[in-house]
Amino acid sequence: MTSPLYNASVPVMQQMLRALSDVLKKAEDHATQKNIDPNALLQARLFPDMFPLVRQVQIAADFSKGIASRLAGAEVPSWPDTEVSFADLQALIAKALAHIGSFKSEQFDSSESREIVLRPGTPKEKKLTAGSYLLHYGLPQFFFHVTTTYAILRYNGIEIGKRDYMGAY
């Protein structure tokens, strides 16, 4: 039997990361066809106090690796945020997909009773059950950054729609 927390995390994040990759490819193609500097899209924001597209993708990838690693009881790898191009972002998404795809459902079997500690040893330390962490913190954060990436691109004229956002399911 497959772990419920595995089913609610890894396959969902794989679907959304693949869709994010496809959306970024459409954005890159759009920039090429319209002779737009790719940095105009990569550094685009919905509002000045929000992160640009590059950072939105980095954070989505960070949440995917963190969620899967924590729920599987594995160390969360540290990846530098050095991406500056569409190719870099595609490589980051591929790395995130490979990382989360490396986990087996069995690694999540005892995760329901696992305690997840965020920001340990700091004044902002927060302790959550694995289920609460996934459903009330991890996935909402992941989806926020995927959605914001989509919104930035749509706002900037990339012809994408709900099917692009959802990807194959």
Image (cartoon, rainbow, N blue to C red):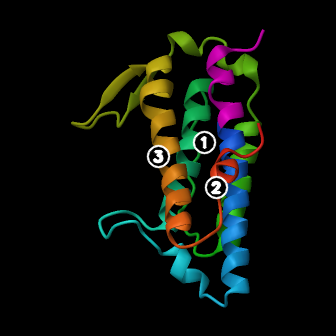
Q: Amino acid at mark 1?
A: Lys
What is the spatial separation of the Cα atoms under label 3 and label 1, in whole angstroms? Answer: 15 Å
Mark 2, other Cα within 10 Å: few <14 / some 14–19 / many ≥20: few
Identify the mark nearer the N-term, 3 or 1. 1
Residue 166 pos. (x, y %)? 67, 44
Badge 2 or badge 1: first in the primary sequence:
1
Q: Is residue 95 left or right of residue 75?
A: right
Q: Which residues are magenta?
A: 1-12
Q: Tell which residue pokes out farthest to the bottom in this image.
A: 35
- Residues packed near mark 1 inside 10 Å, few (<14), some (14 to 19) or many (20 plus): many
Quadrant position of the C terminus in the picture: top right
- Camera-nearest residue between 165 and 37: 165
Q: Is 7 on the left-hand or right-hand side of 154? A: right
Residue tagged by mark 2? 161
Mark 3 and mark 2: span between their CA atoms?
Answer: 17 Å
Who's the residue at 52% across and 43% down the image?
143
Decide: few, some or many residues near mark 3? Use Cα within 10 Å; few <14, some 14-19, many ≥20: some
Q: Position of residue 62 (x, y in %)?
A: 54, 48
Q: Which residue position is annotated with label 1?
A: 65
Q: Which residue is mark 3?
A: 144
